[in-house]
Image (cartoon, rainbow, N blue to C red):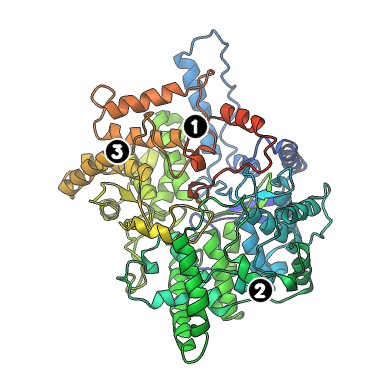
């Protein structure tokens, strides 16, 4: 039986800045669990398999079973509140329901204070990791038979009825999702005709029916790729198109890709690779004109089509620069560029405990370090952190984008305190308080971090844990709000409050993210006011990925945090807080849609954005009576309330940028069943997060 282990780590290749607080990994123990627990786990898996078309995300049932057992002192046997259609909602019913919810959350808290949870969804995370482990020859060392069994379960559970896989869970089949998942199954030991329901064979049919594959595993040629030259890193950073100005996720991904491209790295051409070369193309591999594939993209995958400028740029580099740079003495320039890229990757990896910024960068950097030195220490440090990315649930095992430990902990802490059911808290607030304090970044990155294209991080919180090290503004805002609330509670309930200097440092970095030009706040790093650089977006799959920009949700959350801080500590940077809040309120109001809603970039979607916007405006003194924005926002929420009293929204609102309610989505899909090539757009909101 699988067991979730929290705040543990050992071995020569593992390091931590706070004794692994927040770390969550799954390990298989053949002797763990009672017969009843094992039966419950199998039932959860079976229920998911039977109902997977209706319950696409997992419910983390396996984790909940374990944590409830660990917190068995909490009584969860309160009968649920069930009101008849004509019964009135009274104080007792609300209090009972609230008490039951608080107890459940306390019962699913881990020993170090955070609430473990899956942070996955994209289907393109797991295969690159498997590709890296395969080409480096360690796949059977890192992954046990039980790992492979659960990884296969996950791929089977999320295969679409047409045989393909989407870009994300529940998405229409795409070439990138299908080819990567197909390769993953083959690397995990499945043959070309395996599967209880011919899963592998049906996947191959989808790929061939849609024009053939495009993957890199020695089963695709570098000449079929648009250039990703590492020489850009040698340019002066003041130039407007320097990679240092890229959004951090794009920058770190491009960095690793530029190294692999510059080295033209190829994994071992094994018998399996040779077989894949024959399985996934509509013509013999040796006869493919790779140059013609550089600008081709399966129509099911296109969300952000290339512009003429982009194609012209890639062609210029491919036909002019590349032939020159690969010949002596110009090859010396490429070698210098590769050394610079390696130094930047080393700096970033060390600063994140070899966790890196996220799942895609993790796999690509591992490939880079294996290509650089298969026996080097960096590759071994990276391997030690692979378990941190593998999450298990009833739908199987997958690679997640590390975790959302801090974000979830902060919001759950605020929710529990809002209940005002002090007698139900137990030690939950003390443990959560401990986690939040231990997860704050205490120091900036070492050395000249600006030279390495990084920014201050001291005082911030990450999305996950302290070791990961990447500052996130809205996570910092929510953590700060939580600490301020906890500081006003008795120590015997909430624990010892944080030192005021830590609060000052949090305010410092929030103000650092402020953009005076727009009034908004950026997410990871200060915004780059050069939106025209989006014209250089190299991806057909994502929009708005080239430069850091301001966003609604974190701006609204920061308004709340800064004003909460100022009420308790009016003497610290008060004028700067007032100025930034004033600008942020204008920013939020300008982002309101004609129907009164706000588009949420990092969640689903209009309800999510409206929730944050109203919270920020209310904190700044706006009310239903004195603010037209608040009135319109409230009216929007009332206008979309379901008949039974709740609210719901489809994830399709995100890519389409149009409100899509679940019932309307089902009706639309029913009407379009005959259109097998229907296209749903995909945006970055579903990737991270």
Horizontal side of residue 614 vs 18, given as left or right: left
Outermost residue, top side: 86
Residue 664 position by quadrant = top right
Q: Is residue 13 visible?
A: no
Numbered label attached to residue 102: 1
Q: How many marks?
A: 3
For marks 3 and 2, give the CA distance: 51 Å
* 380 w.r.t. 5: above or below: below
Which label lies toward us, 3 or 2? 3
Q: Where residue 152 sits: x, y (%)? A: 73, 54
Horizontal side of residue 682 vs 429, given as left or right: right
Which label lies toward us, 3 or 1? 3
Q: What SS does tag 1 mark?
A: helix
* 84 w.r.t. 282: above or below: above
For marks 1 and 2, give the CA distance: 47 Å
Q: What SS does tag 3 mark?
A: helix
Q: Where residue 250 sits: x, y (%)? A: 46, 61
Dot 1, crowdedness within 10 Å: few (<14), some or many (≥20)?
A: many
Residue 11 position by quadrant = bottom right
Numbered label attached to residue 589: none
Q: Where residue 657 sits: x, y (%)? A: 47, 39
* Residue assigned mark 2: 136
* Residue assigned mark 3: 590
Which residue corresponds to the image point at 74% horizontal and 56% vertical from the top-left?
208
Dot 3, crowdedness within 10 Å: few (<14), some or many (≥20)?
A: few
Q: Who comes first in sequence, dot 1 or dot 2?
A: 1
Horizontal side of residue 285 vs 252, given as left or right: right
């Amino acid at each position: 039986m699988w067991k979730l282990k929290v705040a543990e780590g050992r071995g020569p290749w593992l390091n931590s800045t706070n004794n692994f607080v927040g770390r969550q990994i799954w390990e298989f123990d053949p002797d763990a669990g009672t017969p009843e627990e094992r039966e419950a786990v199998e039932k959860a898996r079976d229920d998911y398999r039977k109902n997977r078309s209706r319950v696409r995300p997992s419910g983390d049932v396996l984790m909940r079973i374990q944590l409830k057992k660990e917190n068995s002192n909490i009584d969860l046997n309160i009968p649920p509140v069930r009101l008849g259609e004509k019964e009135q909602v009274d104080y007792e019913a609300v209090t009972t329901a609230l008490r039951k919810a608080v107890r459940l959350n306390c019962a699913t808290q881990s020993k170090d204070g955070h609430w473990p949870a899956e942070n996955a969804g994209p289907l393109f995370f797991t295969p690159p990791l498997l590709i890296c482990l395969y080409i480096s020859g360690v796949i059977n060392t890192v992954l046990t038979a039980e790992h492979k069994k659960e990884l296969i379960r996950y791929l089977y559970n999320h295969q679409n009825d047409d045989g393909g896989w989407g870009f994300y869970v529940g998405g229409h089949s795409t070439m990138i999702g299908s080819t990567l998942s197909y390769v993953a199954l083959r690397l995990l030991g499945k043959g070309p005709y395996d599967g209880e329901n011919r899963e592998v064979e049906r996947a191959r049919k989808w790929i061939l029916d849609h024009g053939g594959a495009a993957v890199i595993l020695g089963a695709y040629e570098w000449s079929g790729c648009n250039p990703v030259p590492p020489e850009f890193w040698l340019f002066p950073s003041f130039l407007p198109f320097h990679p240092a100005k890229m959004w951090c996720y794009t920058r770190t991904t491009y960095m690793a890709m530029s190294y692999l491209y510059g080295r033209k790295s190829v994994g071992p051409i094994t018998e399996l690779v040779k077989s894949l070369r024959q399985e996934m193309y509509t013509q013999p591999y040796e006869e493919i004109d790779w140059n013609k594939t550089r600008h081709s993209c399966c129509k099911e995958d296109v969300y952000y089509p290339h512009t003429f400028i982009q194609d012209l740029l890639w062609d210029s580099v491919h036909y002019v620069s590349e032939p020159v740079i690969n010949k002596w003495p110009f090859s010396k320039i490429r070698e210098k560029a590769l050394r610079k890229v390696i130094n930047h990757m080393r700096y970033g990896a060390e600063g994140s405990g070899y966790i890196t910024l996220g799942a895609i960068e993790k796999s690509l950097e591992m490939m880079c370090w294996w290509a650089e030195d298969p026996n080097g220490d960096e590759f071994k440090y990276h391997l030690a952190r692979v378990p941190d990315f593998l999450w298990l649930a009833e739908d199987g095992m997958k690679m997640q984008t590390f975790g959302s430990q801090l974000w979830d902990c902060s919001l759950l802490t605020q929710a529990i305190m809002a209940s005002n059911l002090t007698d139900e808290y137990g030690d939950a607030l003390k443990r959560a308080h401990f986690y939040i304090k231990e997860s704050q970044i205490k120091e900036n990155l070492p050395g000249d971090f600006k030279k390495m294209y990084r920014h201050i991080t001291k005082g911030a919180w990450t999305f996950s844990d302290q070791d990961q090290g990447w500052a996130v503004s809205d996570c910092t805002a929510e953590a700060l709000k939580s600490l301020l609330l906890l500081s006003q509670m008795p120590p015997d309930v909430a624990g010892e409050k944080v030192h005021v200097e830590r609060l000052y440092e949090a305010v410092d970095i929030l103000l650092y993210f402020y953009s005076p030009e727009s009034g908004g706040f950026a997410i990871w790093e200060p915004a780059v006011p050069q939106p025209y650089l989006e014209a250089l977006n190299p991806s057909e799959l994502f929009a708005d990925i080239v430069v850091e920009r301001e966003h609604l949700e974190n701006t609204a959350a920061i308004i709340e945090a800064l004003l909460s801080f100022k009420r308790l500590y009016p003497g610290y940077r008060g004028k700067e807080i007032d100025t930034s809040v004033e600008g942020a309120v204008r920013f939020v109001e300008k982002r309101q849609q004609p129907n009164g809603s706000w588009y949420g970039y990092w969640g689903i979607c209009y309800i999510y954005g409206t929730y944050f916007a109203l919270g920020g405006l209310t904190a700044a003194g706006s009310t239903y009576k004195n603010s037209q924005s608040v009135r319109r926002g409230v009216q929007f929420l009332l206008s979309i309330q379901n008949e039974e009293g709740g609210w719901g929204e489809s994830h399709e609102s995100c890519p389409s940028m149009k409100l899509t309610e679940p019932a309307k989505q089902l009706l639309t899909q029913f009407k379009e069943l005959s259109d097998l090539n229907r296209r749903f757009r995909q945006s970055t909101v579903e990737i991270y997060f």
